[in-house]
Each structure stands twice: as C-alpha cells, then as structure tokens.
Image: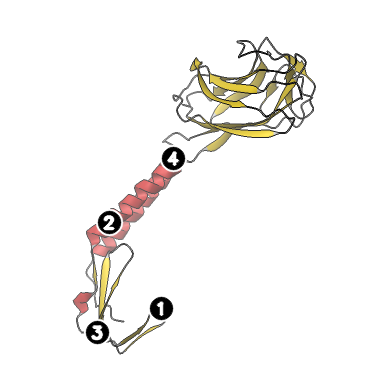
Amino acid sequence: MRVKLTSFFNLWTIKYPTSKIIVGISLRNTECKNPDTLTLSMRKMFFLLLAIVLVVTTQTLKAATIISSFNFASAAGNEESYSADIINGDFLQEASITRGLGITPASGAGTFSSSGFTLAGPDASDYYSLTLIPKTGTALSLWDMSFGERRSSTGPLNWELRSSQNFSLTLASGTMPDDTNIRNHVISLSELSETTEPIEFRLYGFGAEGGTGTWRLDDIEFQAVPEPRGYGITVGIGLLAFVLYTYRRRKAPRKSPICV
C-alpha cells in the first residue's frame, strides 16, 4: 500500500511505503527507502511567496482609513458652521460643514440642524455643504462617506448627495420614511477622481411636509485610501526581502535526507 501526501499548495510531495498511518500523531512501519522522494520545487516556492507579497501589499494600500469625523458632541445645532471633531493630519488640513442660503439654522443639541427645506423637488440652495481641504502636497483618494440623519414630523422626505467635481451628477440619493427615527447611510466615493484641491459635498434635502420642518445630521465620517508611498510600500519591501532571503537559503543543497 502506497500513500501520497500532498501539501495544500502542491509544492512538495512525500511518499511512504507504509502499512499504517495515524495522521498528525505517528507513522508506523515506515521506512525511508528513497531519500529523493521528498522534493521541494524552489521555483514554485519563490513565485508563491512573490504572489503573497503582491497581494498583501495591494490590500495594505487599499485599506481605507478615517480622515475626518463630525460627532457634534458639543454642538447646539444652530451654528453657522462647524469644524470636524477629528481630522487626520496625514490627509487633511481642514474639514467643515455649513449650509446653503436656502435653509435656516435650527436648534438640535448634538447635531447640525436646519429648517426651511423646499416642499417640492431639489432646490439649488437647500443643502448642507461639507468641505475637505487636503494636506498640502497630498493627493486625496476618497473611499466612502457615512452619516446619520433624523427628520422632524414635517421635515424633508428625500435627499441627494453631489460633489464639486461635478455638481450636475448625483452620487447617491435616498427616500426617508415618514417618521422621526435616526437612520444611517454609507455612500461609496471610490469613483471620484483623486484630488489635491479642496472638494465640497452638498447634501440636498427636499420634499418637506412643512416649511418649519427640520432635518438634523450627526456622525458624519469620511474615509480615504492612503497614497502608494506610505506604509504599504514598507510592508511590500519587507516581504520581498523575506522572499529573497528564503529563496537563497532554500537553494543550498540538503546535507542529509529527511526521513520520518
């Protein structure tokens, strides 16, 4: 009876003439008759490790990180503008929120609140404006935006998000239920062009059920992807050095066969 044990990656093969095997515990009645039956393909090993380097480096570079966060913990709700509570200085020098001229500040502790939204379709001046200013010399590659919102019983029932890269293009939109519950949304921004210039996002509210109805925002967060000159390259270089070191060591001939 001959048993062939093959690794998951099929890089090496071990053959044993045996009558009985207890896998992972012991091998009984085995005999190392041919040392050459234990082989290792160094070329396969090299290219496998190189592939791992590329995958790990690519995923590291794509890992999104929070660059700004608005939790409005100290806000009264009716501020004319509000700066982000958290700003990642590796990406941004400033992040803030203001309003369009068509809506009015409204009280709402722990939020950023407004009233006066149009009862009809989108109005060019009824929006929240969020502006991100990249750190000098940094190309900003945005990943996503998330936000929480809550309307009053007569607040707007619809929203749209647009950006200064093309204000005529709607990035995302939604319809709010006719209730006063808190809702959370996540919007992908990965299709936007990388930019070193300030970028503005306008979040429009419309279709209000009354002129005095309010719409509050909370927990706004932006994420971006690091530039390919950051820690991802460091990880890649380290793994590549490991691959080359391993390859050189494996090229040396074995002094004696391995028998089990």
Which residue corresponds to mark 3? Answer: 1
Q: Secondary structure at mark 2?
A: helix
Taking the image as shown, residue 91 lies to the left or right of residue 109, namely left
Quarter of the image containing the N terminus?
bottom left
Can see residue 90?
no
The label nearer to you, 1 versus 4, is 1
Residues marked 4 and 2 touching at CB (< 8 Å): no
How far across and down, in percent of the image, does residue 167 sit? 52, 15
Residue in the foreground of this view, choosing between 92 and 97? 97
Which residue corresponds to mark 2? Answer: 46
Marks 1/4: CA distance?
A: 38 Å
The tag earlier along the polypeptide, 1 or 3, is 3
**Residue type, mark 4 in image:** Leu
* Residue 130 in which image quadrant: top right
Marks 1/2: CA distance?
A: 27 Å
Taking the image as shown, residue 199 lies to the left or right of residue 12, namely right
Marks 4/2: CA distance?
A: 23 Å
The tag earlier along the polypeptide, 1 or 4, is 1
Residue at 70% over, 13% down: 103
Which residue corresponds to mark 4? Answer: 61
How far across and down, in percent of the image, does residue 176 sit? 65, 28
Which residue corresponds to mark 1? Answer: 24
Residues marked 1 and 2 touching at CB (< 8 Å): no
The tag earlier along the polypeptide, 4 or 3, is 3
The label nearer to you, 1 versus 2, is 1
Q: Counting other residues with Cα less than 10 Å from the Cα at mark 2, is it few (<14), some (14-19), or many (20 or more)?
A: some
How far across and down, in percent of the image, does residue 247 sit? 28, 59
Q: Counting other residues with Cα less than 10 Å from the Cα at mark 4, is it few (<14), some (14-19), or many (20 or more)?
A: many
How far across and down, in percent of the image, does residue 8 sit? 33, 64
